[in-house]
Amino acid sequence: MDAKKQRIVIALGGNALGNTLPEQMEAVKITAKAIVDLIEEGSEVIVAHGNGPQVGMINNAMAALSREDSSQPNTPLSVCVAMSQAYIGYDLQNALREELYNREIHHIPVATMITQVRVDADDPAFDNPTKPIGHFMTAEQAKTAEEQYGYIMREDAGRGYRRVVASPKPAEIVEIGAIRSLVDSGQLVIACGGGGIPVTRQGNHLKGTGAVIDKDFASELLAEELNADFLIILTAVEKVAVNFGKPDVKWLDDLDTREARRYMDEGHFAPGSMLPKVQAAVKFAESKPGRTALITLLEKAKEGVRGQTGTRIHQ
Ligand code: ADP
Ligand code: MG
């Protein structure tokens, strides 16, 4: 292993995976090219990813199963996240292996780690669930879900009722030791899918919890734990902007964490989309001198690492 290799944790956003099974199978080919480009340039890469559409699809499918067959109980959201990690991991590792082979790189095994991420049961997020999950329900179905499963249901802009869950902060990556062993031995690892399977500690037992961990925060923790040099958040925009969507929009190339905090305070980044990315980038950049975060488009990852595009956030 080359000690001088720069270590990069990549967080893949929704556009790297698509919204349906066929879309994902196509999207991962482009994603794999972008990732293997970085490996070819001499970096060590660890892949994390989101799972919004996929976990929604799985959750709806499992709910339909329970409706159709009364002997099938409801599938917990934590299990749906586990299923999404396996399904996305399969497509990614399949495409990555093929892309490595296409470039005559035969010495890098690819593996997906099913990852549990511990959250604190007293995380304040649990008092204020905000994240809508799964399909729309009628008022009557919503009432049943509240009574039968203890779901928290909210009316969603006149379109019906949806379950809302908490989005607590990741406290600990349970499988970090296994991930580190694989990464340190030169393997290409996919981990923390969908922000990880949220669990709380009950003595020696880790209990799955109906929550969603933001993938931007889970990737940030993964990058810190693996002592990465770079956290790259790949998303649907090439750069972060101030006055986003306004006539006086200004795209940012480079900002220090002090400037980033000021822009956050001024409300330039939308909560639930760009804000968690900038928060994660700032946290990573401030976690140790020399650590840099980059936010850019999937297709621009290589140029971004070379310093040619994207938004860089540093101390
Ligand atoms: P991902 O699936 O990659 O997490 P999100 O949709 O959650 O993607 O977040 C990326 C989106 O954030 C961009 O496509 C853009 O529409 C939106 N966004 C909100 N505020 C900003 C901003 N200030 N600068 C750039 N993009 C922003
Ligand atoms: Mg997002």
Image: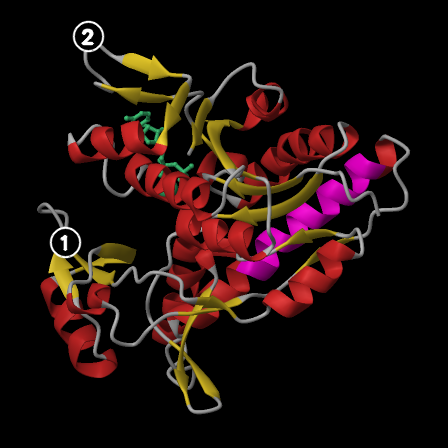
The magenta span reads 85-100
Q: Mark 1: which amino acid?
A: Gly
User: In the image, which disc is placed on residue 34?
Assistant: none
Estimate how packed mark 1 is, as few (under 14), some (14 to 19) or many (20 or more) residues with alpha carbons within 10 Å: some
Q: Residue at x 60, y 61 (%)?
A: 86
In the current view of this chain or complex, which residue is farthest to the front?
289
The quarter of the displayed image where residue 120 is located: bottom left
Which SS class for mark 1?
Answer: loop
Estimate how packed mark 2 is, as few (under 14), some (14 to 19) or many (20 or more) residues with alpha carbons within 10 Å: few
For label 2, the residue is: 247
Q: Residue at x 65, y 29 (%)?
A: 34
Residue 247, image x and y in percent?
A: 19, 8
**Mark 2, mark 1: which one is toward the viewer?**
2
Residue 41, image x and y in percent?
A: 75, 27
For label 1, the residue is: 160
Q: Mark 2: which amino acid?
A: Pro
Can see residue 233? no
Can see residue 181? yes
Which SS class for mark 2?
Answer: loop
* Magenta span dominant secondary structure: helix
Q: Nearer the viewer, residue 304 or 95?
A: 304
Left or right of 50 on screen, residue 133: left
Q: Residue at x 26, y 69 (%)?
A: 123
